[in-house]
Amino acid sequence: MSEDALTQSDRQGRTVVLVDDDPAVRDSTATLLEHAGHKIHAFVSGDALIEAGVPPGTDIILLDVMMPGRNGLDTLRALGAAGGLPPVVMLTGHGDIPLAVEAMKLGAVEFLEKPYPMAGLLDLVSTLRPNPVRKAEDSQQRQEAAAAVEKLSSRQREVLRGLALGEQSKITAHRLGLSIRTVEAYRGHIFERLRVRGMAEAVRIAVVAGLLDD
């Protein structure tokens, strides 16, 4: 079988674990993914998933950050301790970026900010590799991310750092002595230089590159 055929096969019929305490979000997301041909195991909380265990054959876990009881970070830690964890994508609300960054340091491969575009969710679920390298310390990924960040100016790197830390534009502007409009312009330039579509991808590069390590 050719590599192209394998890739096409990988894009179909994923087994997805969805963990979200919001019934409206959980039901609509599950319905969307089922209509796209994926098999869904939905859980109302991280505690419920841990009690039941990750279903065999799970290809990807969609994990909400803010939930009653054990939150997304604690759930990720517990799942990671058991080993053999499939790729985890964090689902975050507005203002949860620092938590999403921490989750990526714990091994999550990506995060989506609510309300996430459904087309983006479908694309991510369909194309994410079943067994990606998940550690930010992975040398190849880190080198590639570091090379991308190195193309930014020092001021752009500072703005990207603020973005990854979840700073509001006005906070970043005050810290750097810039106007809010200038910070917003920098963000647009950063996305262009990193060749990313938005904040989630930019923040992931910042984390893998070690921009937040200091």
Image (spheres, rainbow, N blue to C red):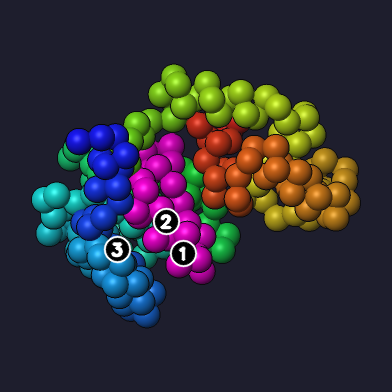
Front-lying residue, 195 or 71: 195
Residue drawn 75% across and 54% down? 169
Residue 123 badge: 2
Residue 181 visible, this orientation: yes
Q: Please provide the residue range marked out in magenta.
A: 104-128
- Mark 1 residue element: helix
First-in-chain label (2 vs 3)? 3
Q: Which residue is mark 3?
A: 19
| Alpha carbon separation for disc pair 2 and 3 | 19 Å
Residue 209: image x %, image y %? 55, 28
Q: Are marks 2 and 1 in contact (CB under 8 Å)?
A: yes
At label 3, counting other C-alpha atoms closer than 10 Å, the crowd grade (few under 14, some 14-19, many 20 or more) is many
Residue 168: image x %, image y %? 70, 55
Residue 119 badge: 1
Amino acid identity at mark 3: Val
Residue situated furthest front in the rendering: 2
Height in image: 143 above or below 178? above
Residue 6: image x %, image y %? 25, 40
Amino acid identity at mark 1: Ala
